Amino acid sequence: MTAVVDKTAEGAIPPGDEPTPAPAAPASHLAGTLRRYPLAAFAALVLALIAFGAVFAPLVGTTDPTALNPAARLQGASATHWLGTDHLGRDVWSRLVYGARVSVVVGLAVAALAVVVGLVIGLFTGFIRWLDPIVMRVMDGLMAIPGILLAIALVSVSGASIVTVIAAIVVPEVPRVVRLVRSVVLSVREEPYVEAAVSVGTPLPKLLWRHVLPNCVPPLIVQATYVAASAMLTEAILSFLGAGTPPIVPSWGNMVAEGRLLFQIAPMNLLYPGIALAITILAVNILGDALRDRLDPKLAKRVGQR
Amino acid sequence: MTTHQGDGPVLSIRDLAVALPAGADRRYAVEGVSFDVGPGEIVCVVGESGSGKSVTAFSVMGLLAKGELHAERGQILLEGEDVLKATPERLRDLRGTRMAMIFQEPATALNPVMTIGDQIDEVLQIHTKLSPAERREKVIAIMEAMHLPDPQALYDRYPHQLSGGQRQRVMIAAAMVLDPVILIADEPTTALDVTTQAQILQLIKEMQERRRTGVLFITHDFGVVAEIADKVVVMRYGKVVEQGPAAEIFANPKVAYTRMLIASVPSLEPPTRTAASGEVAVRTRDLVKGYGGKSWLGRATQPSVLAAKDVNLVVRRGETLGVVGESGSGKSTVARCIVRLVDPTSGAIEIAGVDIAGLSTRALTPYRRRVQMVFQDPYRSLNPRRTVGASVMEGPMNFGLPREEALARARRLMSLVGLSPDALDRYPHQFSGGQRQRIAIARALAMEPDVLIADEAVSALDVSVQKQVLELLDQVKREFDLALLFITHDLRVAAQICDRIAVMRRGEVVEEGPTRELFLDPKHEYTRTLLAAAPGRHLGPAVAAE
């Protein structure tokens, strides 16, 4: 049926040597996009709330998340402790909100780092032919390392800190970004307008920046959301295993780990961070899907948007 | 099986109007279209892009894009039955049995993971109750009728194992296996080489004669029309501007637009030209480009495919050298080697006396300026995200020209190529194909090159636009004393613009000489084959001179 659609487009082109009509302007941005994807709008709202809570953690009804209060252990929800307390008497709501900081920071940092590093490597790898096999074999090697094992190894070498965790998650994510960028570059490289730029003597860095990079941005934005979601999850897993952030810093992962011990007595202490993690990751993924639909014109058309 | 009875038209289109979606630049894609196709008659619908010729064809098949186009008025009578009123089930039944369609691109119209035989067999499976053995027999028979070599063996092959011409024959076989009364052909030979095109046209003619199939043939090429049409329908802006018997249309076109279209077809008769005597701008010596010769660790082995083999070409300033050949002849490879978009395997490329074949990227830079290229596809050769001005100015600014001066030069060049200098602020999508090709020429000229390479630079354009762009190329060649290397598959275009022509086949130059001599007295057999295959050879200077 695509052929038919194309013919329609041909019919719409004014005959003779007149300009073709401008394709629909990049649909008027955020507002329009959100209206068309209500689910994505809701996901964005949820994420905004989580980010707000993480940034302004001291202002959203929290107390010191690390303050011990043995007298008030394992209490249920109340006016003072909105979500109750854990086995050391710490306020669960406070720990949940402060724990979001770790997730948000890890998610954003990993996504940004993986994308930037992967983008640079991918651009050059895709464009410089002799570099390609070398870099890609290194990337294959990196991909073969299980991310969590690598993280545990790194943490055992350099100690548990949020920086180590971020580094440990970024390393296995980079090859995925490199592959994505490289595949875009390989196809764009053959575009006549890139060849035209080569033949007017455009130096390589300029060529990549001006003519190739803009084509990589849409798929990268989408990839970044998935990287962020998986980073949050990996961080939680690492914390759960005790290889993540130091135990003193509240994070959803170590909350789950601690909640697990007394699951039969206070199940909610495990479920609260678990639910928070699930909601966050679901929201990020929904947003990523919506962005993918929006940024890929072919897909957008297929689901009826133009 | 079910050939048409009687003498009435097999297809009769009456006052057809197909509405475009609201907000389009005109209300109807086609309007007031009426014509008949009789049994055993080839009706050519000719027009430039946007004329509505394809929409007409798709309406007959009931293949208009749902929700975007719909037939608002009129009738399409297939043996008296109105296709527009048919239910989807009835339409599905009619397609394949009473009417069939073939498309432009045989490579994509066939399913790559199904064998040839199965694809033709599918039609029979859907529409008949024949046994597998009977079906196979029928498939083999139709493949034989389409002159496909060794049908028994071909039955189990996959599309990628066939040549373009064979794939188109398979498409026609699938279309004709149930003997429809009408065959709709939408630019079926546009993607094919001239020699293959000639064979396919011959095949379509043969079918029309033997099986009395009516053919509705959509094309933009008046050469093809002259070759096969019994009747011609000329369309423009969605309306029929003129129709009549082919002989009459060619001998005595009544409408100015038809005359213009026919006159725009370049004549195969080359004008007399004086040999250029300028200095040599580019010379290739034993240029070789091979592919696939590197093993995993980069050790050079013998190249498995030679795209260009010992090519020796010379272009002088003020001269146009045409490189003519079919797809796979290596003509584009040579061009890309000279611009150094690909690195030649061996041999020399001399620009102003210096061999640039082996220069490193850095050492090459000063010579980049001297050789510029205009690409085939005007829709892809300009970066869609950058303004036209940015594209034109990029080159000079790479070579250190200050922005203001680059801008002044770009404005001057825009006027030179016939566009407004103010258009520099606009984006490529705001221009038509012809205009974009003018911009691409301006971009090349901005580098003040000695050599301009036009790689199929006019083949994606409508004939009337093609003519203008050719004139522009010729004009800038004279104005800037350029050496023009003109790569084309189109002998008509080559005849009109080139001083000398080199004919390439399978990577080798088989014949080279002054255009007029080469056309009037071709030495090599392949050149003769090419010339004989050019469609509408009798579309001579008599008409073109008008």
Image (cartoon, grey):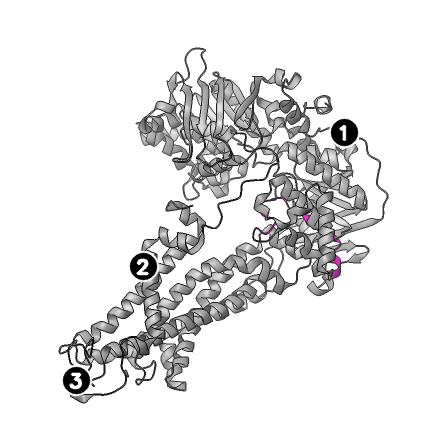
Query: Residue sitting at 42 percent across and 69 percent down?
Result: A111
Q: Of callouts 3 and 2, which one flags the residue occurring earlier in the amino acid sequence?
A: 2
Q: Nearer the viewer, residue B179 or B269?
A: B269
Q: Nearer the viewer, residue A74 or A30?
A: A30
Can residue B514 be spotted in the picture?
yes
Asked if residue B379 is among those painted magenta in the image, a careful observer would answer yes
Query: Which chain is mark 1 on?
Result: B
Query: Which chain is mark 3 on?
Result: A
Of labels 2 and 1, the one closer to you: 2
Q: Name, please, the residue furthest toward the top.
A: B6
| Local crowd size for mark 2, using a 10 Å CA cut-off: few (<14), some (14–19), many (≥20) | some
Element class at badge 1: helix
Q: In the rendered image, which quarter contains the N terminus of chain B? A: top left
Residue B11, given in percent of the width and then of the height, sits at 44, 19
- The residue range painted magenta reads B366-386
Q: What residue does disc 2 label?
A: A42
